[in-house]
Image (cartoon, coloured by chain):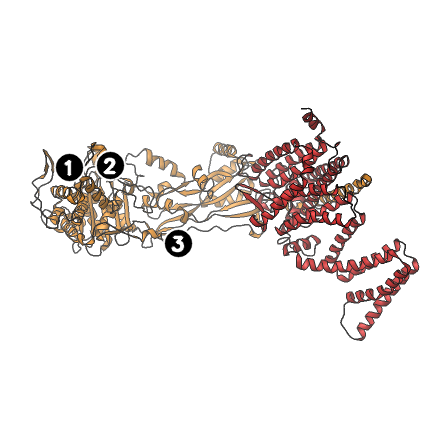
Chain colours: A red, B orange
Amino acid sequence: MTRRVSLIKNLDWWTILLYALLVFLGWINIYAAVYNEEHQSIFDISQRYGKQLMWIGAAAVLAIVILIVESKFYSAFAYPTYIFMLILLVAVLLLGRDIKGAKSWIELGAIRFQPAEFAKFATCLAISRYITQYNFKIHKIKSLFISAVILFTPMALIVLQGDAGSALVYSVFLLVLYREGLSGVVLFLAFIAALLFVFTLLWSKFTVLLIIVCTSLIVAKVYGLKWLSFVKAILLLGLGFALVWLIAKGVKVEISNYLILIISLGLSAIPFWVHTYKNKLKNVAWTILIVFGSIFYTFSVGYIFENILEVHQRTRINELLGIESNPYGSGYNVAQSKIAIGSGGFSGKGFLNGTQTKFKFVPEQSTDFIFCTVGEEWGFVGSSFVLILLLTLILRLLFLAERQRSPFSRVYGYGVACILFFHLAINVGMTIGLAPVIGIPLPFFSYGGSSLWSFTILLFIFLRLDANRLELLR
Amino acid sequence: MNNFSNRIYVIGGIFVLVVLIFMIKLFNLQIVDDSYKLSAENNSQRQVTQYPARGLIYDRNGELLVYNQAVYDVMVIPRQVKVFDTLDFCTLLGIEKLDAIEMLERAKNYSSRRASVFLKQLSSEKYAVLQEKLYKFPGFFVQPRTLRKYPRQSAAHALGYLNEVNNKEIKADPYYSQGDYIGKSGIELTYEKELRGEKGKKIYWVDVYNRIKGSYRDGKFDKQPVSGKDLVSTLDIELQEYGELLMQNKKGGIVALEPSTGEILAKISSPGYDPEMLVGRGMGANYKALVQNDSLNPLFDRALMAQYPPGSIFKMINALIGLHEKVISPFTRFECHGGYYYGNRKMGCHHHVSPVDMRQSIMHSCNAYYANTFRYIVESPKFGSVNNGYDVWRNHVMSFGLGQNLGTDLPHELKGSIPSLDYYLKVYRRKNLKALNVISLSIGQGELLITPMQMANMCAAIANRGHYYTPHIIKSIGKEKSIDKKFIAKHETSIDPSYFPSVVDGMEMVVTGGEGNTGGLAAIPGLRVCGKTGTVQNPHGDDHSVFVAFAPRENPKIAILVYVENGVWGSRYGAPIAGLMIEKYIRGEISDSKKWIEKRMIEADLINQSEKE
């Protein structure tokens, strides 16, 4: 009895309050999104809001069950749960049902669920367990390799299902690893990579290359390159470029500036290598490596973009970057979504009064584009409120994670917070045109039992761990 | 490990930063940038259902029987209604102000957000005036609809009528929504799916004054309605109208079939009603009047739903079964002295020559002959017992399509009844049936119940010498001219075709056999008509007059049944009306020598006369 009492006392009721509030607001907006004057009752389970209500009820039961289970269970069973989820992910590939091009649903009689949703908490448990093992060292190749295997296995299986969006979620574990000591450089490089990706698509190869070279030089200078060497480098590069250009003109070969720059870079790199090798200039060597790494990267970006990404993924990215614009074709979703949100104004049109949400302008209104309903009917006030509410929950989770005595609980807490954040960023980002259209749900808001339950499990396992925060779990 | 705990600020910072960027973007979208509001703020869409034109119905000769007429329902969405000039509105619609308030109240009670009908079926003229001023009355709009229109006031039972769907029908088929019309009887009901077509929808931009500003997104989400399919009926509307004329002021029915196809040429149930009565605003009141205030029940389709004993027209069946089972031959003779005597009882017969052979027995409609034949059949030693004999007999009877649903394409068809052996064993509380218990079956009386449609079909089977096609009223559907396969399937009777000619001889003698024949009034000069009278005993009043006939004798074009309730003798009304119908159908007009019969039939009034009695 004392244990039960202490559990109730130790639970973080603020988080639960935020959770309940978000789920409630989500349901209200699903109701508005599918609301039709012809519908009879709010409990009509043939309608989505009726079903969601059912699933909310089930989620509450699920939450209670999770809280009752001993917290040691979650660390002890982290690996078995993870393996079980992997088996499910394989099973869905073999037995799954095709819905909208993705083979990601398992059907058990009348129940249909998406294993990819549940793989999140399992992976989160497994990675937390692994990172907190004694022999784990963040910068040991073996440790990093195994962490990568733990993350990439479910990711790959989910990509195979044709659900690339859900697979991307796992990339957010980079932040978790960062908190556990991964070098900031990795984070920075990831950021640079993303930036370069965008630049490669936006600008010509020559411009991008020029940017790379200039940035590297500046960085090298900042990191202690002497003025003399700096000037020398620029002169060498300029000379090389002029030389190659003149030769090309001389032998009358049509050759692009881009190629000339690359050749001259290659040429001028040789004396640099010799110079750095002689003087053991580590920084300069790094700079040169990064420059060539970046060049290779921009090449592969073009290749990946054209050959590996599917057409719809490519057009979504092009739409986002404004390279392509077709508000009635590929960009229809986002254009309509922005109109819906934009027309909400300061305080919105009021509950059930959204005109854009009626008539099904925005496809997937109740699932991936639920934020449109919020934006249209509750305006800037409402949508900001929802954003702040979600942010508060996520920051609260970070705070809770830091107060854990057990590293396992802390890593898991970070995992939960980061997963929620990734969903928030991508989902809301895409509805307002700041992120590519990736079909992942808004936590607690989007219609759908699988996603609601998955987020509930994710969150409540952490709350259970948090209730025992003074214990040391191994 | 906790030496990295500062990194919470980096991670938290990233989170806050992203959300901040989102909020700035939202601020920009929702507050700074007006372009998104511009179109959305003052506009909303209205979805208007586009009702498809219901399929038309033609008769077999291409005469139009049913078409559509446009009317306009004034709809209201109470929530959108603003204060308006009630007086102006009411004069436009031609209604009283108090009624208008009441109607609005009713609409509000139904739903303030959903559109409901404010005023039904406004004429095109009134609509034209209203349309001009509709913008003054936000919340109101007009929904075009179509009503059925009948150029010939005929064949009401066969065509059927439409009415608004009820809740049960909406639940059964989600295609329908409140206020839609659906076929409730006749062809309109059976062929509802073909006739109704497919609803379309149009989405309009409308401004705050509910004025249509254009189609939404260039009609990208619109759906064109698909018109219903036109139907060609097998009815010959001239014959149909003529039959209705002949049957005026009489109760009963006529069914005329084309034996070679099973097509229904005419189907009359008298008294009938004008199909226009069950259309439009007057429908409710008229329906009530037809159902409640008319003891003759004109909505009741006698051709399909009245179940009568067939009477003497059934004798052909017994003759055929007797011949097939070889218990009689066409030359078998039986004596008849005023009836058939068994024990101390007697089944009477009228006066005629005696003895008679099989052909003469049909001509004179001899009861004794069939009592004998029936006993010979069921008591035949080859069946072992009367029970078995009765079953054999019953199976033969049923093979003519009697005692079961024929499967026509008209709804509410009744089965009639050829009682089973069990039924009789239960009634007589015995294990073994005795032929004399059921002797009245021999002359088509007793517990037999047959609908006029079945009687006509039976006659067609005889006309075809042993087979029939399921009677049907639609010849072809839509442009494909398709028809259900079951209507081209041949149904064989269990009687060998070789036994029919002698029975047909007898039927021809009924009409043109000279002295003592019973159906002489059906005769048509120059046409070999075969027929049979029936006089059905009626405990409630005068006997019913029945006549079946087909003509010409070879390659018959028409098989007909006429059933006139309280017509006393088969020869009195049944035979002459059948004769006129056949002549009308085959020749197109009535020969001068028969005009007097036509006049007498049209003028005969059995309804008012019997009411006087």
**Left or right: where A206 falls relative to A94:** right
Q: Which mark is residue B436?
A: 1
Q: Where is residue A335 in the image (x, y as percent from the top left)?
A: 65, 49
* SS type, badge 2: helix
Total numbered labels placed on residues in the image: 3
- Considering every residue shown, the one lying at the far bottom of the view is A251
Of A461 and B101, nearer the camera is A461
* 3D distance between C-alphas at marks 3 and 1: 54 Å
Amino acid, disc 1? Leu
Is disc 1 placed on a helix, strand or loop?
helix
| Residue that label 3 marks | B478
In contact (CB < 8 Å): disc 3 and disc 2: no
Q: Where is residue A379 in the image (x, y as percent from the top left)?
A: 68, 40
SS at badge 3 = loop
Contact check, label 3 and label 1, Cβ < 8 Å? no
Q: Is residue A369 visible?
A: no
Q: Residues within 10 Å of mark 2 (few under 14, many from 20)?
A: some
Q: Nearer the viewer, mark 3 or mark 1?
A: 1
Q: Is residue B447 visible?
A: yes
Which quadrant of the figure contains the N terminus of chain A?
top right
- Mark 1 and mark 2 lie on one chain; the one further toward the N terminus is 2
Residue B156 in picture, x, y percent from top left: 32, 44
Quadrant containing the C terminus of chain A in the rendered view: top right
Closer mark to the observer between disc 3 and disc 2: 2
Q: Which amino acid does label 3 sit on?
A: Gly
Q: Which chain carries label 3?
A: B
3 or 2: tag closer to the N-terminus: 2
- Residue at (77, 60) in percent of width and height: A295
Disc on res. A66: none
Residue bearing mark 2: B422
Quote the CA–CA distance across marks 1 and 2: 16 Å
Q: Which residue lies furthest to the front in this view?
A: A135
